[in-house]
């Protein structure tokens, strides 16, 4: 069973940047991966996804142009570079294995990491 362990996150002022990492217990070579987030009192929502080859990425409109999803050279790591953050980006962020924007399409999840953006 693949395990996903997240790191990164924290608190930053509006306009700042953060980078999230998600390390898998095995290679992610054959898996599509994604990032989701969940703000207090809101449903978990799709943020970005990347296919198994890394050639195709999809972003939510709310983060397009500001966030970049990528895969590590070691093929066991997933990244989310977040730039020009704003308070609406405050949430717990999760990496997950699967494809699409529906939560039900993902079977393995990281533990979550808190991102807080202050104004």
Image (cartoon, rainbow, N blue to C red):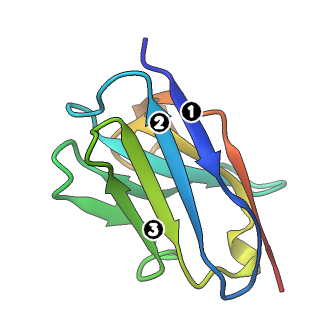
Locate the C terminus by quadrant. Answer: bottom right
Q: Which disc, if any, is residue 5?
A: 1
- Decide: is 81 above or below 26: below
Mark 2 → mark 1, Cα distance in angstroms: 5 Å
Residue sitting farthest toward the top: 1
Q: Is residue 51 left or right of residue 8?
A: left
Q: Secondary structure at mark 1?
A: strand
Residue 25 placement (x, y as % from top left): 43, 22
Question: Can you identify the residue that label 3 sits on?
Answer: 60
- Which residue carries the number 2 mark? 23
**Crowd tier of the residue under label 2, counting other residues whose Cα lies within 10 Å: few below 14, some 14–19, many 20 or above:** many
Give how far apart the Cα atoms at labels 3 and 1 are: 23 Å
SS for tag 2? strand
- Considering the numbered disc 3 on the image, is that residue within a helix, a strand or a loop? loop
Residue 46 position within the rendered picture, expressed as x and y whole percent measured from the top left: 51, 55
- Check contact, mark 2 vs mark 1: CB within 8 A: yes
């Amino acid at each position: 069973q693949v395990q996903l362990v997240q790191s990164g996150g924290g608190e930053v002022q509006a306009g700042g940047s953060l980078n999230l990492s998600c390390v898998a217990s095995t290679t992610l070579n054959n898996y599509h991966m994604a990032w989701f987030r969940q703000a207090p009192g809101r449903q978990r929502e799709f943020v970005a996804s990347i296919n198994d080859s890394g050639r195709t990425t999809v972003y939510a409109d709310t983060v397009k142009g500001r966030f970049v999803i990528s895969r590590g050279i070691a093929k066991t790591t997933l990244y989310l570079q977040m730039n020009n953050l704003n308070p609406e980006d405050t949430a717990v962020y999760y990496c997950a294995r699967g494809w699409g924007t529906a939560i039900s399409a993902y079977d393995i999840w990281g533990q979550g990491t808190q991102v807080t953006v202050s104004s």
